[in-house]
């Protein structure tokens, strides 16, 4: 498959000791750098982001618009896509709709509008961060997103939860959540990891995973980021 004129496949890099060590110490399991496709219509921004990501991430391709990003995702199969919300040819929402089932997608944008965040979640993104996020925080959040965890800029998440608490209409699920499941859902909506949720609720990581699985079954949802959307829509904070 050929790529568009603005798309770039970047040379593969070997796993570094630093990347493997960070994975062992902080995340476990996978002993390689996270493979990333970066999509933004500003080449200077893409270059700066690539430098900020560091050795625990390996940028395998870059795209300047939505169509190029989709093409790269389908041909390269990255672990993570970091894309701007407002790019040419459909923007990040088009990328999320086309590729959200195949990889983890995080919007990295200047927009702090709650509607943009909700649209990104609905489209299939599992993260939404603003471009002013400090580099250390950005790396930490993108690492979490690559593992499938929902990540959101805290100020935005708080704003949206507050808005939907006022707007939400009572329309409960077919099967009501237990008190514990509701607690777990609240923490998921705030972007906590399974480990952090377990520490807060004094239960094992595996138990948290089981609760998430039960919630998914009850709510007939098939992706973890949809838990966040459900919480927003039902005013759970």
Image (tube, rainbow, N blue to C red):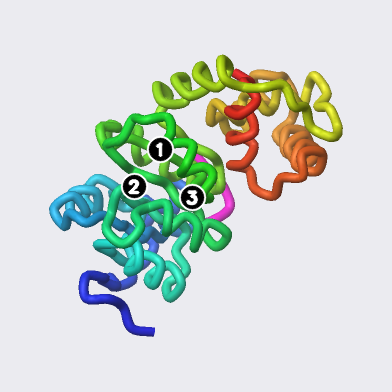
Q: Is residue 69 visible?
A: yes
User: Percent from the top left, x then y, of residue 38?
Assistant: 31, 57
* Image quadrant where residue 61 sits: bottom left
Residue 209 counted in the magenta span: no
Q: Are the residues tagged 3 and 2 within 8 Å (C-beta)?
A: no
Tell me the element at label 2: loop
Name the residue furthest right.
175
Q: Position of residue 172 (x, y in %)?
A: 77, 27
* Residue 2 vertical placement versus 71 (above, below): below
Label 3: how many Cα within 10 Å (few below 14, some 14–19, many 20+): many
Name the residue tied to disc 3: 146
Q: Is residue 13 visible?
A: no
Q: Element type at marker 1?
A: helix
Label whose residue precedes the other's in the sequence (2 or 1) = 2
Query: Could you tell me how far apart the alpha carbons at marks 3 and 2 are, in whole angstroms?
Result: 18 Å
Outermost left residue: 44
> Which mark, residue 85?
2
Look at the numbered discs 1 and 3 and tell me whether their residues touch, using CB distance below 8 Å: no
Q: Which mark is residue 225?
A: none
* Residue linked to disc 1: 116
Quarter of the image that includes the N terminus? bottom left
Residue 54 spot, x, y in % from top left: 28, 49
Instruction: Calculate the distance from the C-alpha at mark 2 to the C-alpha at mark 1.
Output: 8 Å
* Element assignment for label 3: helix
Taking the spot 38% from the left edge, 45% from the top edge, the residue there is: 107
Q: Which residues are magenta?
A: 25-30
Residue drawn at point x = 59 percent, y = 18 percent: 237
Crowding near the residue tagged with mark 1, few <14, some 14–19, many ≥20 C-alpha atoms within 10 Å:
some
Residue depth check, mark 1 versus mark 3: number of the one nearer the observer: 1
Q: Could you tell me if the residues under marks 2 and 1 are in contact, i.e. CB atoms within 8 Å?
A: yes
Against 14, residue 55 (above or below) is above
Task: Look at discs 3 and 2 and give the one toward the viewer.
Answer: 2
């Amino acid at each position: 498959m050929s790529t568009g004129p603005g798309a770039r496949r970047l040379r593969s890099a070997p796993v570094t000791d630093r990347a493997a060590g960070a994975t062992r110490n902080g995340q476990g399991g996978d002993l390689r750098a996270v493979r990333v496709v970066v999509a933004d219509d500003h080449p200077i921004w893409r270059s700066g982001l690539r430098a900020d990501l560091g050795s625990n991430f390996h940028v395998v391709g870059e795209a300047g618009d939505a169509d190029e990003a989709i093409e790269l995702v389908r041909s390269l199969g990255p672990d993570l896509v970091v894309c701007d919300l407002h790019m040419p040819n459909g923007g990040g929402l088009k990328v999320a709709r086309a590729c959200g089932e195949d990889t983890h997608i995080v919007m990295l944008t200047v927009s702090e509008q709650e509607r943009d965040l909700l649209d990104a979640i609905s489209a299939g993104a599992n993260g939404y961060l603003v471009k002013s996020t400090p580099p250390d925080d950005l790396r930490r959040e993108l690492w979490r997103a690559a593992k499938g965890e929902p990540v959101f800029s805290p100020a935005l998440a708080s704003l949206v939860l507050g808005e939907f608490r006022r707007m939400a209409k009572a329309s409960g699920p077919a099967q009501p959540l237990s008190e514990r499941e509701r607690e777990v859902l609240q923490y998921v909506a705030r972007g906590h990891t399974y480990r952090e949720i377990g520490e807060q609720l004094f239960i094992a990581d595996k138990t948290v995973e089981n609760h998430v699985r039960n919630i998914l079954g009850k709510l007939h949802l098939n992706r973890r980021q949809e838990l966040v959307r459900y919480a927003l829509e039902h005013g759970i904070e």
